[in-house]
Image: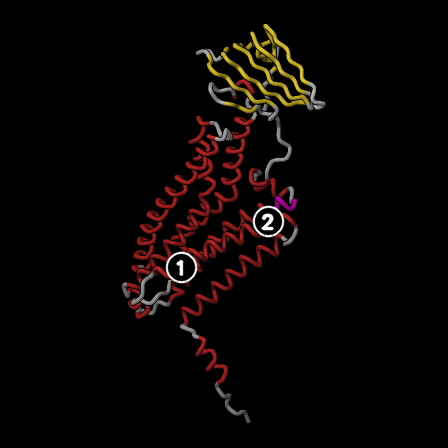
Amino acid sequence: MLFHSTLRKELARSFGATLVVLVTIVMTMTLIRTLSQASRGSVNPQEVLMVMGYTVLGYLPPVLTLSLFIAIVGTLSRMYRDSEMVIWFSAGRGLSAFLTPLFRFAWPILLVIAALALAVWPWSNQQTQELKDRYGKRGDLERVAPGQFQESASGTRVFFLDKDTPDNKSGKNIFISTNERGKETVTSARSGRIETMGDNQFLVLANGQRLETTEAGQLKISEFEEYANRVGANELVARGNLPAKTRSTFDLVMEPTRPHLGELAWRLGLALAALNFVVIAIAVSSVNPRAGRSGNLVFALFAFVVYFNLLNLGQSWISTGRAGFGTFLVGLHGGVLVAGGLWLAKQHNNWTLRQLLRHRAAPRPDTP
């Protein structure tokens, strides 16, 4: 009992500290990337915190997995360094005895990781995609900002407004460049105002000039006292082809296309990888008390990176048909579990290559 409680208390402290550090790093990196997207016009500047929150929420499964992995490796490595392992081994506790207290500590975290990967991950991606689409498909007039060149939602127009009024219904020194149906048109005006006629919005320009160039190179210049340019608002439409990462796990199961199976394998892989990392952490934590423990921590991080890169690679292979869904899951996760179990058995029984060679080379007794 003392063995279990002592180990779980230290694991809880290490896991909490590691999780805070990793979440802080992820939040900082996500904030920088979101601000960059906002500066490019992909994200509404007023919704930066919401986009960042949904993104961090989607990244929690690998963050929790890495925090649990580092906590187990760090705790067991410290016990080796401080010679506590010698005491537990002398009391008849082998290395495999750590499986029970570790899984008792880790099972709530493993359930949270599975829930986040299967349910929260697609929901957070869907919310982020909706925020980006809503901002990307806003009306052309809503895109216009004083002193900045702004592109329309269709990408065929560029607007420039020198100065606007407090009601945002009129402005001065307006420039519009349009490229539609092989015609390039440049319109400039001293002032303009917004008028609503029925369901449509018009930008009414006053005292301006219109320069039109056709594909044949013909140039047409006209001046006007008043000119109305229709600038319709783009409404959000239902997207028939949602990205696989925004679809629920139930939808992926009901529509088992290759991209959907690849996404499903990635989500299931997050939960299975977290389970395998508990076994791997016990095996890689064995260190020489006289040596530093940084070596096995670096190796643990390297194993984590390789494993998750294999998850991403497998998702790509399944999506392109280069690997089967069941074959990949059994081959990768089952293979890692078997390798981790054999490694743990080697550490538990103190197997060495020399002992195996001696056992194989030993002469067999003569049989009558």
Q: Is residue 39 rendered magenta in the image?
A: no
Q: Nearer the viewer, residue 57 or 6?
A: 57
What is the CA distance from the residue labelled 1 to the residue labelled 2? 36 Å
Please name which of the two marks, 1 or 2, marks the residue nearer to the observer. 2
Secondary structure of residue under mark 2:
helix
Which residue is farthest left? 82
Picture quadrant where residue 288 is located? bottom left
Q: Is residue 259 rendered magenta in the image?
A: yes
In the image, residue 287 lies at what x, y percent?
35, 65
Crowd rating for badge 1 (residues with CA inside 10 Å; few <14, some 14–19, many 20+)? few
In the image, residue 196 lies at what x, y percent?
58, 10
- Could you tell me which quadrant the C terminus lies in? bottom right
User: Relative to residue 10, is residue 166 drawn left or right?
Assistant: right
Q: Nearer the viewer, residue 86 or 305?
A: 305
Indicate whether 275 appears above or below 61.
Answer: below
Tag shown at residue 316: 2
Overall secondary structure of the magenta stretch?
helix
Q: Nearer the viewer, residue 182 or 199?
A: 182
Q: Residue at x 50, y 33 (%)?
A: 128
- Could you tell me which quadrant the N terminus lies in? bottom left
Q: Which residues are magenta?
A: 257-262
Secondary structure of residue under mark 1:
helix
- Total numbered labels placed on residues in the image: 2
**Residue type, mark 1 in image:** Thr
**Residue type, mark 2 in image:** Ser
Disc 1 marks which residue? 100
